Image (cartoon, grey):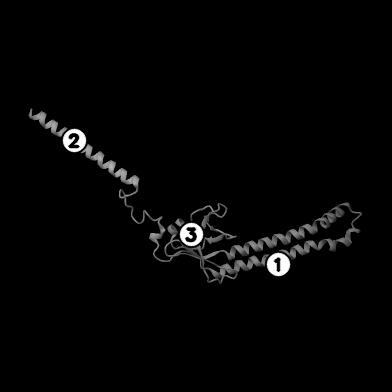
Amino acid sequence: MLYLSRFCSLSNLGRFSLNNLKSNLQVNVSKWNNGSVRNYYKPKQKDAFFDIEGVITKDTLLFRYEDAKKVRLRNFAGMLMLPIWTYLGYFAYSLKSQMKPYEENVETNEKFSFLLNNVLSASTGVGVGFFLFGAGLSSYWTIRTMNTIRKAVLKKGGKYILLQPYGFLGRNTSFISVPVVHCSGIQYKFYGKHRFFLKVRDHSFKYSFNLEDGIFSNRPLFDRTIGVSRTF
């Protein structure tokens, strides 16, 4: 009888503990569904790093590329392409008028006559093509150099990014303030790890980061802000 009474008391205690556990779970689940409590896990600051507003308490330098002399030389080389290809285009375009008097002298020679006719018929198109190629190459090189980023600074609060492009002569000292959500990072396979591009909403051209010569001051923060690919 004594053992039987002890067994009954233990079974009643176990049933009571299970009932208490079920009731506690139901209360916690109901509170969770109502959104009134979320204390099951409290991440550390490094785990909640995506919450930029609570992490960035001052202006933080993300990236810098300090080589104004090299940028100016590249910009000068890009602008120099225009007069060179313009001269080549003019030379090819003027071949028709220069070679026209020799047309009668090669009429008896079928080979030279064929070559001269090809030059006369193609000189205009080749000249225009040379000029357009030079203008496009020079424009692209100059614009890319102008939009090369010198410094990228994340402002306090983490909502805005300050971008300092080199500009036309590499002497630009002003910053452009852009919301972080308006930035989309692009990494082309063609450029590998040498260049990184940043697309900004309502901006015609992409900003370029020279990863080969530039220095990341805070790479994790860079990747979580302007390094994120977004769709506009």
Q: Position of residue 177 (x, y in %)?
A: 50, 65
Q: Which mark is residue 139?
A: none
Amino acid at pointer 2: Gly
Q: Earlier in the sequence, mark 3 or mark 1?
A: 1
169 shown above or below 221: below
In the image as oriented, which residue stretches furthest toward the top?
1
Closer to the eye: label 3 or 1: 3
Task: Report the side of 226 relative to 136 (left or right).
Answer: left
**Helix or strand or loop: what does disc 2 sit on?**
helix
Q: Which residue is mark 2?
A: 14
Q: Which amino acid does the dot numbered 1 rest on? A: Pro
Image quarter hosting the N terminus: top left
Q: Name the side, left or right, on which 123 lies relative to 221.
A: right
Q: Look at the numbered disc 1 and give the secondary structure of its residue.
A: helix
Q: Residue at x 83, y 57 (%)?
A: 120
- In primary-sequence order, the first of circles 1 and 2 is 2
* Residue at (41, 58) in percent of width and height: 52
Q: How many marks?
A: 3
**Residue bearing the label numbered 3:** 180
Contact between marks 3 and 1 (CB within 8 A): the answer is no
* Horizontal relation, residue 84 to residue 122: left or right: left
Give the distance between the C-alpha atoms of the residues marked 2 and 3, in whole angstroms: 57 Å
